[in-house]
Image (spheres, rainbow, N blue to C red):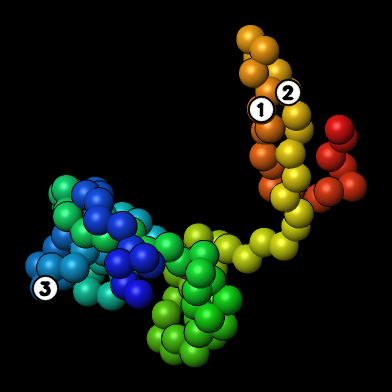
């Protein structure tokens, strides 16, 4: 299952002493880790991207249980994971005789005009 839920990629990350896994942007304040206050530096890190949309509800519900995290860090994680409800639809169009469909997702379908 992990193969379907993850994609190997390289990404820029911020590393510091005692932090071999890297710190996310929201965990760095003025160039220092928010927990350790250690200086962090930006490096290219091999890793995996997780398809978190499959687990978004579970992740968001679990954020409430993270004691000791600053409110701004929890809010950034919540915004990054996101929870959107809406509708998918498509606008048909034609280019050089080829018919296509422009797929759209919106959280405000009543404001979308065809």
Q: How many marks?
A: 3
Q: Nearer the viewer, residue 38 or 45?
A: 45
> Left or right: 11 with respect to 112?
left
**Label 3 belongs to which residue?**
18
Q: Looking at this rendering, what residue extends furthest in the left direction?
A: 17
Q: What element does badge 1 sit on? A: strand
Q: Are the residues tagged 1 and 3 within 8 Å (C-beta)?
A: no
Query: Within 10 angstroms of label 1, few (less than 14), some, or many (20 or more) residues?
Result: few
- Residue at position x 87%, y 42% from top? 111
Q: Is residue 55 above or below residue 50?
A: below
Task: Calculate the distance from the C-alpha at mark 1 to the C-alpha at mark 3.
Answer: 52 Å
Instruction: Report which quarter residue 38 is drawn in.
Output: bottom left
**Label 2 belongs to which residue?**
93
Q: Nearer the viewer, residue 79 or 59?
A: 59
Q: Is residue 53 above or below residue 108?
A: below
Is label 1 or label 3 in front?
1
The answer to whether residue 88 shows anywhere in this view is yes
> Left or right: 84 with respect to 40?
right
Image coords of residue 98 (percent x, y): 64, 18
Mark 1 vs mark 3: which is more N-terminal?
3
Q: Nearer the viewer, residue 66 or 48?
A: 48
Q: Nearer the viewer, residue 101 or 10?
A: 101
Task: Calculate the distance from the C-alpha at mark 3 to the C-alpha at mark 2.
Answer: 54 Å
Image coords of residue 55 (percent x, y): 50, 74
Mark 1 vs mark 2: which is more N-terminal?
2
Q: Is residue 44 above or below residue 19?
A: above
Give the number of the disc on residue 52.
none
Q: What element does badge 3 sit on? A: loop
Q: Quadrant of the C terminus?
A: top right
**Label 1 belongs to which residue?**
100
The answer to whether residue 24 shows anywhere in this view is no
């Amino acid at each position: 299952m992990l193969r379907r839920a993850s994609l190997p990629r390289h990404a820029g990350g911020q590393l510091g002493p005692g932090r071999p896994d890297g710190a996310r942007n929201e965990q760095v304040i003025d160039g220092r880790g928010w927990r350790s206050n250690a200086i962090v530096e930006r490096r290219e890190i091999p890793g995996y991207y997780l398809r978190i949309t499959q687990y978004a509800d579970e992740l968001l519900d679990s954020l409430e249980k993270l004691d000791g995290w600053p409110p701004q860090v929890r809010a950034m994680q919540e915004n990054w994971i996101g929870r959107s409800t809406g509708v998918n639809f498509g606008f048909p169009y034609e280019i050089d005789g080829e018919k296509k469909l422009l797929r759209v997702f919106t959280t405000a379908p009543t404001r979308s005009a065809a």
